[in-house]
Image (tube, rainbow, N blue to C red):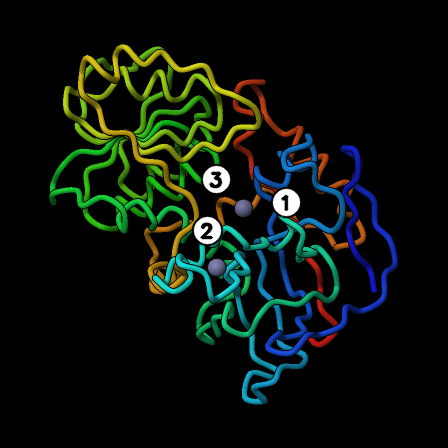
Amino acid sequence: MLAVHLENGAVTTRTLPVPHRPEGFALLRLLTAGICNTDLELQRGYYGFTGTPGHEFVAEVVEADTSALTGKRVAGEINLACTHCEWCRKGLGRHCPNRTVLGIVTHPGAFAEFFTLPERNLHVLPDDVPTHRAVFIEPLAAACEILDQVSIPAGEPIAVLGDGKLGLLIAMVLNAHGYPVHQFGRHPAKLAIAARTGVETHLAPASLPTAAYDWVVDATGNPEGLRSAAAMTRPRGTVILKSTIHGAVPVDTAPIIVNELTLVGSRCGRFESALPLLSNPLIRFDELIAARFPLAEAPKAFAQAAGAGEEVDYRNSLSGFVSHRCRCSP
Ligand SMILES: [Zn+2]
Ligand SMILES: [Zn+2]
């Protein structure tokens, strides 16, 4: 089978045997996958990754212990939890210390014709959700995670910093939940996507207000993001951190302590919260797709995803797309 291979920053394709399906796992055939900032971070050396990347996907079940799953179109949670540790027993497998992660930590990823995931990770997709929308469920769930972690009173304005794929999804999700969202970014064309759904957008950094919001989300993907977010937050306000950055970020703690800010780290979310939003017209998935490529052209897709940025600072927050036409689609 064809598989993408990442090693020392180089993206290539190679032919590998179809993976063995362990008990409790499903063998999946890739339909469509998305390249996200995390994949570009892996390419830069995050987690010392070598192997097949890919964690945002829609696939068809080829074989599983549960025969009813065969032939179903699925998305899948990316954390492979051990199921028996303290965290797993609390239902927090996403924090299992023994976990592997699809295409990120140890477990071979979805940028291949075939790959495996535990059956319990899979979610069968409703027939009326097109594959090119469903492929966003993983970052969509990450956006939804914010509202699982903090309860923001209805009507409270929320500032979102960053206009990459995740920043846009966060802004559109919060807006779809009825919050007034003010998004700050550096790319007029990207901000326009959120603006069309009713988000109030501002071109940064010219217009970054000081001590203006009780709720600020940093999704810039750059080390300056936290400082800007803290400066925008009112005393006793909350900053939600969505940027994962390779390497240490220097933080000036004085404004955080003086203003008694709450910092909330926020990562992956539950797919259950995201599933209903896949068909919400206020989330403009189609407009987040930069380009489509067959799997064999993955090196080109990675190059485009990494290089499409107009500004170096925001290079991290771009989305690309690998599209793989499966044998059974028309
Ligand atoms: Zn991702
Ligand atoms: Zn565990």
Q: Which of pointers 3 and 2 indicates the residue nearer the eye?
A: 3
**Picture coordinates of residue 83, whole percent (x, y):** 48, 66
Residue drawn at point x = 38 percent, y = 57 percent: 92
Which mark, by number, is residue 165?
Answer: 3
Q: How many C-alpha atoms fall within 10 Å of the one at disc 3: few (<14), some, or many (≥20)?
A: many
Query: Marks 2 and 1: in contact by CB < 8 Å?
Result: no
316 is higher (above) or lower (below) than 109: above
Q: How many C-alpha atoms fall within 10 Å of the one at disc 2: few (<14), some, or many (≥20)?
A: many
Seen from the viewer's position, the closer of residues 101 and 162 is 101
Image position of 96 (left or right of 280): right
74 is higher (above) or lower (below) than 235: below
Seen from the viewer's position, the closer of residues 135 and 228 is 228
**Picture coordinates of residue 249, whole percent (x, y):** 48, 19
* Residue type indicated by callout 3: Lys
Mark 3, secondary structure of its residue: helix
Which of the two discs, 1 and 3, labels the residue nearer the N terminus?
3
Mark 2, secondary structure of its residue: helix
Residue drawn at point x = 80 percent, y = 69 percent: 18
* Residue type indicated by callout 1: Ala
* Residue type indicated by callout 2: Phe
Seen from the viewer's position, the closer of residues 102 and 275 is 102
**Picture coordinates of residue 225, whole percent (x, y):** 40, 21
Seen from the viewer's position, the closer of residues 252 and 302 is 252
Where residue 157 sits, quadrant-wise, is top left
Q: Which residue is mark 2?
A: 285
Quarter of the N terminus within the rendering: bottom right
Which of the two discs, 3 and 2, labels the residue nearer the N terminus?
3
52 is higher (above) or lower (below) than 234: below
Q: CA distance from mark 3 to mark 2?
A: 9 Å
Q: Which residue is mark 1?
A: 291
